[in-house]
Amino acid sequence: MTSSTSAPVLVLGCGPVGQTTALLLARWGLSVVVLDGRPERDVIGSKAICQQRDVLDVWDSVGVGAEVARRGVTWTTARTFHRDEELFSFQFADRGKSPFPPFVNISQCETEQLLDERIAAEPLIEVRWGHRVTDIQQDGSGVTVVCATTDGETPVRGAYAVACAGPRSDAIRAALGLSFEGETFEDYFLICDIRTDLPGWETERRFYFDPEWNPGRQVLIHPCPDSTFRIDWQVPPDFDLAAEETSGGLDRRIRQVIGDQPYEIVWKSVYRFHSRVVDRMRVGRVLVAGDAAHLVSPFGARGLNSGVLDAENAAWKIAFVARGWAPESLLDSYHDERHAAALENIDVTGATMRFLVPGTDEEAARRLDVLERAATDPSARALVDSGRLAEPFWYVDSPLTTPDERRPFRGRPARGDVPVPGPGVLVPDCPISVPGRPELGRLRQLARAGVTVLVGDDAPLPSRPETLPADLPVAVHRISELDAGPTLREALGARPDEIWVLRPDGHVAAVLTRIADVAPAVARLLDRSVPSPVLA
């Protein structure tokens, strides 16, 4: 694709969200300048380790998802314990046939390395280190980002900008006039990456409530590559890591988990969790993404995973506006959709933190009652909150989604499950075959090429809406021609008389039964003027 704009899109921050944003923009043919205040990449600690299946799929669209999955550790089971008794475990649903596992654990540093290698091979992307953003100015034709550099104050001009410089983005948020309301939790959490041998623990995440080796608090254990395990201990506000090491307490703490065997501490850190969100995620020509826009506790791995989905949402919409395929008002839907996703994550992780850290004696007593009953009572197990793991948000209330009363959204699915496909939901992935397109072997690869219309065998084949720009990528396919068997049809739950409209990020925009409704649904997902449907 060739860019239709002369000025680049500016990406503020070169962490995983910024890297993903840059690669996705380049994939749509836009030139990108990435600005980061650090002098170079800082390779420290494992940080965000847990990558969800649909995020791997986004990374696969820019050429790194399969390698992240190959290098990482796959886990499929989440186990929850109270003291030394297992309460329950669950695995993760896949309504289609994704090539990716539910979760892969890999150091954030290694993920950044793979994304850096891909960026280095992309001529449309330029990365400028040592550019700390101090101000952002906008006018009707673009954005000027003022940076502090070793050469003094340096302005950088772009058509649009995506601000994803991480949690310490105070200057950026101030320049955009954003509030960042929320709370900071009192307890600290100690994290250690430990290289050791724990047979049988390599493919599961373990969560312990009130174990005898951390009484009154929690411990979370994740497997990582290279025989490394990430252990998170909830610790009191007065915890002193240096004193813990000096006294031998840290060694005792580790031994209580792994037993009497050799180990090596690869990285350790102590930090507090925050729960905050900006009031707006679009400010003129600037979209705010990732930790710059929202912070949540890591129980559920919703931080980086949500940030990558911010990146995909922002990238396709900026690209469609920049290329003249959609009006600039389409960018408003970025806030509508991703701010709602951030609030959902805060609601989910806030409930988890309230269960982990009860605020009153009454709440603590209620939690203990739930945990004790959960050993034998299935209804109590549903009340145990050890972190609802990351999942894509459902855009059922988005202005881009055409609702369907035949397929109502039934709310947040059960733990480990995914919503039934329908308007606003991310389409399940399935193997497909596209005549003349051997590079497309999966439904989501087809969807990410533009606007996709899937047609049942009993529905008329719609023509391309005449109101759309001539170069807008729109593909129309019969479901049976993509997959002659039942896999795709059954994964969607598609009826023979239905027409499905998919967005460029793979979410379902509409499920229709009248050919006259296709053009209005496509116009709606692009925030273009909606043509009046023809009665039929």
Image (tube, rainbow, N blue to C red):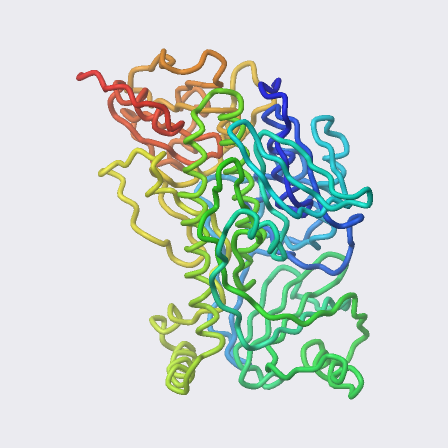
As drawn, is 518 to the left or to the right of 254?
left
Q: Give the residue at x 68% y 59%.
A: 47
222 and 348: which is toward the camera = 348
Vertical comparison of 151 with 377: above or below: above
Res 431 visible? no
Residue 346: x %, y % from top left = 45, 60
Residue 300: x %, y % from top left = 52, 60
As drawn, is 121 to the left or to the right of 493?
right
Q: Give the residue at x 40% y 43%.
A: 336
As drawn, is 486 to the left or to the right of 189?
left
Residue farthest to the left, as pictured: 535
Residue 43: x %, y % from top left = 78, 54
Quarter holding residue 2: top right
Q: Give the residue at x 47% y 61%.
A: 181
Quarter holding residue 536: top left
Q: Give the residue at x 61% y 19%.
A: 1
Residue 516: x %, y % from top left = 25, 18
